[in-house]
Amino acid sequence: MPDSKTHYQLLDVAATATPDEIKSAYRRLAKSLHPDRNEDASHEAIAQLNTAYEVLSDPLSRRSYDQQLNYMPTSAIPRHQRDDVAGKQYRRRQPQTSSDQQIKDWLKKVYTPGIRIINQIIKPLKGQIRELSADPFDDALMDVFVAYIETSRASLAKAEKLFKAVPNPPTIGGAAANIYYCLNQLSDALNELEYFTMSYNETSLHTGCEMFRIADGLKKEAQAAVREVPK
């Protein structure tokens, strides 16, 4: 390792710091180095901070880094990647035939409560951003926004569990696929919004909002597909 500060030192945390401690430290330092708050902050300092957080916030990257620092033994862990394989596995688990009762059960147990949860995540976003825009650096306002993200994550987990609980009838496969990808978009969007709350990087905020827009479009496509299904 080069003779310089470690990522832990850059974030001013111990090598045993928890993910929440690392996140909190990064948010605090990113705020103090933001150009709108600190005109003397160097691009190099900001870049080093971002790199440190990027490494330590990812469990596999942190493990590899700790190995370089001789903090822990080598251990191979496969990296999870979300791609089309998930979609293919989802499609393979669907039943081959539909019945009126299957459709009714899916609409009642999955679709209706799922759409309600999705709306609970999407609809408050504009109001939340409007409130935060008064002063993104105000800790109280940011805490409210962070709470919204955390609540949305919990709601998203419920929707994902609901969606996996009951296989969809093939005749509603199109609507189910749109909801599936809608949930994926919301998951990625919340990641972007969370990154904004720590880095104050407006690009992440805009990206998250765009992903919310795409998710809302997928939800509406699912609703349109369901309306066309004979009941």
Image (cartoon, grey):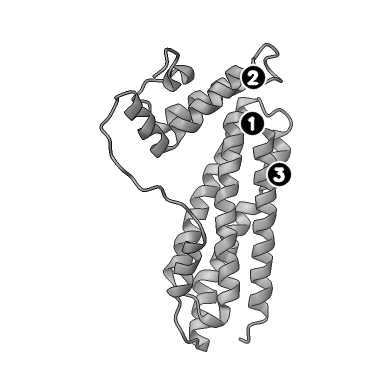
Q: Disc 1 marks which residue?
A: 141
Type of amino acid at the residue the image marks with label 3: Gly
Q: Residues within 10 Å of mark 3 (few under 14, many from 20)?
A: few
Q: Tell me where residue 90 appears, x and y as whole percent.
A: 46, 69
| Residue at 45% over, 27% down | 22
**Residue drawn 69% across and 49% down?**
210
Q: Which residue is mark 3?
A: 127
Q: Residue at x 55, y 64 (%)?
A: 180
Q: Are marks 1 and 2 in contact (CB under 8 Å)?
A: no
Question: What amino acid is found at the position of numbered circle 2 in the picture?
Answer: His
Apparent side of residue 108 relative to residue 128 in the rendered image (left or right): left
- The circle on residue 49 is none
**Is residue 206 visible from the viewing direction of this image?**
yes
Q: From where the camera sits, is residue 144 visible? A: no
Q: From mark 3 to mark 1, how far is it between C-alphas? A: 12 Å
Q: Is residue 196 above or below residue 7?
A: below
Closer to the N terminus: mark 3 or mark 1?
3
Residue at which label 2 appears:
43
